[in-house]
Structures are given as C-alpha cells and as structure tokens.
Image (cartoon, rainbow, N blue to C red):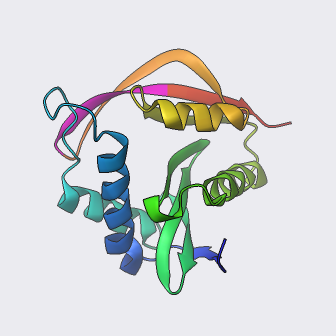
Amino acid sequence: MDAVAVRPATPADADAVEDYHHRCFVMTYAGRPSAGGFQPPDRAGTRQQLHDWFRPGSDCTTRVAVAHGTPIGHVTISGHRLVHLFVDPDHHGTGLGRRLLALGEAMLATVGHTELELHTRVENHAAIAFYGRAGWVVTDRVIHTVEHGISYDERVLVKHMS
C-alpha cells in the first residue's frame, strides 16, 4: 500500500468521502435491479450526514485514511457501535479495510467498550464475510433503516473484546 496517513476527519472531507461511498454502493449492487430498494442513497443527504459527523462536537468520531492529500477510506464510531467503514474501490484489496476496522475496534475499546456492534445491509454478503473473518458474529437481529431516500434491512453483528 502506498503511504497512507490516518487522521481525524473534517467537514472538508465530506465531498470526497461521499464520492467513494457512492462508488462503493454502485459497485456492490451493480448486478441488482434498481427496483426494490437498491437505488443509491441520495447523494446530497449522504454528504450532509458525513459533514455533520465530521464536525467538532458530533456524537461520531471518524478517522479518514488519506493518500496524496485525498481521502480513500474512513471508519466512524459512535457509542459502542462501528457506524461506518468504507474504502475507495480503487484501494480494495490493499489491506486498508482491515487496518481501518482494527483502528475502529481499538477506538471503541479505548473508551471502555467491550461489546461492540455494527449494522450492514442484509444483501451485502461481501461485507458480512469481511467482518466475519475479523471475528464479528452475525446475530438474528435485523434492523429496518430508512435514510437518504431509501429503505433497507440491516443485519446486526457483534464482537466481544477481551
């Protein structure tokens, strides 16, 4: 992997992060029909959410991975949850996702959480497998989410930190 620095996210990162977030969605669900909830999230709404998460005083803490001055991945935590983890598709397979996941887990453990939780779309088999390889366990809990103009179900995964 090229030299990648990880730093706190700032609101100025929101546009670049939304860009690769959108490309991740399109790539993950490219073979899915556009009907039935597989429309991409509203881009302006996603940008605003990221901007809000990245501003000082937010309930979320985000670290962004940067290469050549451009965000290429991020991890967001809030409470005991890993809320968001995305890597620019151009950097898939480099180990950056594993690095950001380990960072997010460490951030949660550092503030005292031992029972961690994350949610991922039920159809995102690649993400579920990725987290499973890192010791996360799929539960039978499913959460229905409506945001950014789309509605979908998410699997709840948990991990116990010793």
**Quadrant position of the C terminus in the picture:** top right
Is the residue 12 above or below the residue 77 in the image? below
Q: Position of residue 29 (x, y in %)?
A: 31, 39
Extreme residue toward the bottom, this view: 69
Q: Position of residue 40 (x, y in %)?
A: 22, 46
Q: In this image, 156 relative to 46: left or right?
A: right
The answer to which image quadrant residue 43 occupies is: bottom left
The answer to which image quadrant residue 154 occupies is: top left
Is the residue 77 above or below the residue 145 in the image? below
Q: Which residues are magenta?
A: 149-155
Magenta highlight on residue 150 = yes
Q: Observer-nearest residue: 28 or 142?
A: 28
Q: Observer-nearest residue: 65 or 51?
A: 65
Q: Which residue is at a point 16% across and 43% down the rendered structure image? A: 149
Q: Which residue is at a point 13% across and 29% down the rendered structure image? A: 35
Q: Position of residue 63 (x, y in %)?
A: 57, 67
Q: In this image, 107 relative to 41: left or right?
A: right
